[in-house]
Amino acid sequence: MLTIASRLDVMNRLGRAMADPTRSRILLELLSGPAYPARLSESLGLSRTNVSNHLACLRGCGIVVATPEGRQTRYEIADPHVTKAITILVNTVLAVDDGEPCTDENCDVPLCCAPADSNVEENR
């Protein structure tokens, strides 16, 4: 049975994993199934070193597992519950107050720092 401490640990590990945009992109790719670092680097437009570093972090968080296959290593999401949870999260509609200014000057989340209507007008 999970205790509050272990549940908190799970939430912290998931939060750390998904807090970085590159790790989130890797996880989204892995939702489709297992992958190799070389394929991930190609599909995400990242260096193999960058992908490998992020995969090591995800592995350290317990989110992904690595399976050696000869000279390659296959990565996949460690537990079907994590796959289901990420799928549910990405399909969630968030209630964002467009009238509130963003407090993060380096924010790169689409539609976070500007009202949705102004983005629509700019793209016309």
Image (cartoon, rainbow, N blue to C red):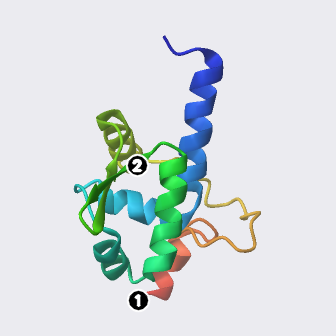
The residue sitting at 45% across, 45% down in the picture is 63
Q: Which residue is mark 2?
A: 64
Residue at image point 38% right, 39% down: 82
First in sequence: mark 2 vs mark 1: 2
Crowd tier of the residue under label 1, counting other residues whose Cα lies within 10 Å: few below 14, some 14–19, many 20 or above: few
Q: Residue at image x 46%, y 69%?
A: 52
Residue 33 drawn at (x, y percent): 22, 55
Rendering coords of residue 62 (x, y %):
48, 42
- Pinpoint residue 21: horizontal percent, then vertical percent: 53, 66
Q: Is residue 72 left or right of residue 110?
A: left
**Residue drawn where x is 49% and y is 78% of the image:** 49
Q: Is residue 116 above or below residue 120?
A: above
Task: Name the residue carrying label 1.
Answer: 124
Q: Quadrant of residue 42?
A: bottom left
The amino acid sitting under disc 1 is: Arg
Horizontal relation, residue 10 to residue 83: left or right: right
Tell me where residue 81 appears, x and y as whole percent: 34, 33
| Image quarter in which the C terminus is found | bottom left
